[in-house]
Image (spheres, coloured by chain):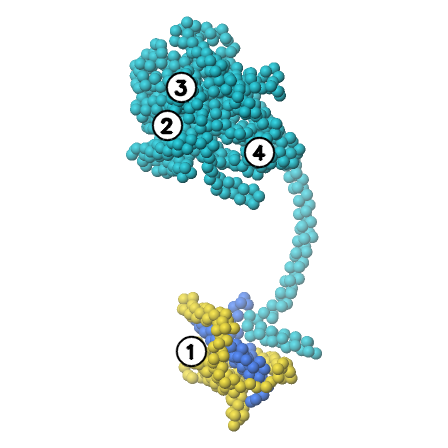
Chain colours: A yellow, B cyan, C blue
Amino acid sequence: MADFIFWMIWALIVASAALVAFGNNLIHSVFALMGTFLGVAGIYIFLNADFIAVTQIVVYVGGILVLLVFGIMLTNKIQSAQISQSSVQKGLGVLVVLGVLAIVLTAVLPHNWVGGTTPMAFDDTVKGIGRLLFTDYLILFEIASVLLLGALIGAATLARKEL
Amino acid sequence: MIKLALFILFLPLLSFALQIFFGRRFEDKKGEWVSVGIQFSTLIMSLVMLVMMLSKGDPDFSIELHQSWLDLGLFKIDLGIYIDNITVIMLNVVAIISALVHLYSTAYMAGDVRYSRYFGFLGIFTFSMNGIVLANSLFMIYIFWELVGLSSYLLIGHWWEKDSAANAGKKAFITNRIGDIGMFTGMLIIATVLGTFNFQLIAERIHDGMWAANAGMLFGGIEPHKLLTIAGVLVFMGAVGKSAQFPLHVWLPDAMEGPTPVSALIHAATMVAAGVYLTVRIFPFLTADAMATIAFVGGFTAIYAATIAITQNDIKKVLAYSTVSQLGYMIMALGTGAYVAGFFHLVTHAMFKGALFLASGSVIHAMHHSLHHLKDHETDPQDMRNMGGLRTKMPITFGVFMVTTASISGIPLFSGFLSKDAILAGTWAYAANVHDGWLAHLHLAWILPVFGFGAAAITAFYMFRLIFMTFYGEPRQPKIFKHIKESPKAMTIPLVVLATMSLFIVFTLPSVNPVSDHGWFTTMVQSPESAVTTGAAFDLEHFKHGLHEAHVPAMVASITVAGLGILLAVLVYLLGKISADNLAAKLGALYRGSYNKWYMDEFYINGIIRPFLKGCNALGRFDLDFYDHYLINGWGRNVKRSSKGVGLADDLIVDGAVNFSGIIFQWLGWTLKFIQTGKIQNYLIFVLIGAVMLFVVNVF
Amino acid sequence: MDHLNSYLVLSAILFSLGLYTVVTRRNAVAILMGVELILNAANINFVAFSKFVTHNLDGHLISVFIIMLAAAEAAVALAIILNLYNDRGHINVDEANALKQ
């Protein structure tokens, strides 16, 4: 059962991501992206990463996706739900991306990972992440807060009408 | 005591700042009384210090305050305050004269164009003078030395609208610089050998043999005591400039262009005494040779200036040359080892010469007002030939003149007698005790007492000449005489106070014997031990013994010569038994020489300044005609020619290379510009293609 | 589902699709979506390695920071896109080549 659900989610992610990449309708692409994000959240659950999964849903689906929709709505004169989009240099793009995919797969799959690949089941990651965040990763955490503040101010400044 | 000293040092600076920055605003509201008040408060503090000193009664008393100022690792300069009995006495002298001069100036300078500035400059002068007095090192003395030079320059040139005043200021400044060069060089020699400027440390280190150990090594194998002699004489050069000793005395008579109270304060009582004070401070490390040099400079100055004073007609010029002469006395005393006498004469002279100048100022003031009343701007108010018979009109001024003249002439019962007698005894003892060395040949040392007694006789003569010409006889200008009035109280009070200070009792207490040499002054001031250890040291013990023996004969001789001088003056100027004109005609060349100050100024102008300027002109022409024309311009012409050639090479070769590379890159750019689409996604694709290709190349 | 490679392959495919989106789309918002796909692919890798190879939570931490970074990046990018729109009336990246001149 779990296997089945895993592969279903796997397929969902690949299909929706393909729609994002190849679809002609921008709105469809955005909703397909939501499917991808939710699927990735499901994958996180299979990896015992409960905190990341929840964060994925909250931040990506609740935040970034909404931002993207806003971006689309604000930058198109909406007459219908159909917002077409077009692509450039498709042939070259497919060729190059397939090349990159081939490189990645040939590099990664046959590799012998140090320490093997035995799975390990975490049961409560929240506590561990919290502890690490305020011990080993404290400076990173503080820098991140500064970065967020900078992004906040930067975004607000850039979005003003009179730049 | 240190705190009091700091107040005394810095309060006059406050006075200066107030007068300079706010003086104009308070001119109508009696702003000068701030300065007068400050000076009198420093006077009170000085008196407190004097009382403290007397109650201690310790001749060796001293305290010192250090403050590091400049620290360059090995080389350190400390600033600090050194207080001993001499300092306290000197502080009192400065404070008394300065306070009285401030008071006097409120009347004398009333209505002057730069009234507040005048008081400001008096303030900075007093500050710098106190700085010299309190200094604990040669370096700090040097700083304040230059500051008094500056304030003297400013005050001499107070009426700079007059060319003569402006020139006198410049002359004083430049002449002093010449002496200061020597002083600075001497200071540096001492500091190089001993590594300190501090008086106490210098004496200590010389005593401990550091000089003998270092001097030869540092200065090319010179004999240490010779170097010490050189250093001492060089430092003394500063005193030669500041105390107007021959040959740098020429500035002091000209400095009389300044206001008369300034002459009294700076050019009679305090600043010119700074040179003597410096010599007092360096006394412990003078060698016998250096002291002999000092004695001869002083002795010659004493007699030389006295002979000039005889023939001068300007009342202030007479006093100026008298000052030079008396300063020569003090220097001579220090040179002969009569340390106490020299310093004693410095103090008594400050009192009676200050009074004399202020009294002459009172006379000039009266003359000036009378002339002003007559609307006469031609007649010189300072010329004694326009005076005469003033004693009835100005009784207080006349009285003061009498007392102080008696003092300077060395008549018993007055302070001048005590100090002058001690100096003459000192020269006598010195001459009698020289038995070896170059001084013993031909009895050269006996020149000093001859100078001393001769100058004493001449001093008595010209001072009484001054009195008789000014106050006795028939008024020479009856019109002017009619309007002469006694000066206001603000001027007469300082006169009376200073005249009182010229009485013997002030300095001999608790003894009331008028010829006593055991007053508080002579007990509190004791000559220091010489720090010089080698055979070059001056034999003080021997000298003191001789001094005791010479005391009585010197006293008799000094009274006799003073009496002779006075008698001659009475005969010539009061009774008219001997005609001054006939005498002048008979003496001819001597008279003209004295009248023209022995042509010293002319010698400087014709002998030094003109040739120097001529030399400068010649050098200038050489520069212009030869150096500029042939070397600089010729070099320029050659450079121009060669640069033309280089320019040609530049055009062909260097520019050609540059243009060629430019063409290459132009071609490259033209070829490659098609890649530059400006579309970010194209670039991304190129990057990815590059990455794939790199991978492929790496793997296969 | 218990094998590392299934996650790595998924991540690689997701990455390629994101890359393709970034390279070919003309619309700036669509490109942004491609960037999000790439970031998700990276996240999957980090969490998967955390479970299968390193056996600690460092990977999770990095994921958290990446998600945070993505949020910040999306905000700033959208602000820029809005400016571009205000300036030109469209958000086609291939026409935004003023740098060429």
Label 2 with label 4: CB-CB less than 8 Å: no
Residue bearing the label numbered 2: B101
The dot on residue B451 is: none
Q: Which residue is mark 3?
A: B513
- Give the secondary structure at mark 2: helix
User: B645 left or right of B619?
Assistant: right
Measuring 61% from the left and 27% from the top, which residue is drawn there? B535
Indicate the amino acid at tag 4: His
Task: State whether residue C84 appears in this view.
Answer: no
Q: Residue at x 55, y 70 (%)?
A: B678
Task: Indicate the position of residue C67 as horizontal and vertical percent values.
Answer: 49, 77
Q: Amino acid at mark 2?
A: Val
Q: Are marks 2 and 3 in contact (CB under 8 Å)?
A: no
Whole-Å distance between the Cαs marked 1 and 3? 116 Å
Q: Nearer the viewer, mark 2 or mark 4?
A: 4
How packed mark 3 is, by other alpha carbons closer than 10 Å (few <14, some 14-19, many 20 or more), is some
Q: Are marks 4 and 1 in contact (CB under 8 Å)?
A: no
Q: Are marks 1 and 3 on the same chain?
A: no
Q: Are marks 1 and 2 in contact (CB under 8 Å)?
A: no
Q: CA distance from mark 2 to mark 4?
A: 42 Å
Find disc 1 in the rendering and name its residue. A70
* Circle 4 or circle 1, nearest the eye: 4
Give the structural element (helix, strand or loop) at label 4: helix
B506 and B360: which is toward the camera: B506
10 Å neighbourhood of mark 4: few (<14), some, or many (≥20)?
some
Q: Which label sits on residue B207?
A: 4
The three-letter code of the residue at mark 1 reads Phe
**Whether marks 2 and 4 lie on the same chain:** yes
Which one is earlier in the sequence, the residue at label 2 or at label 4? 2
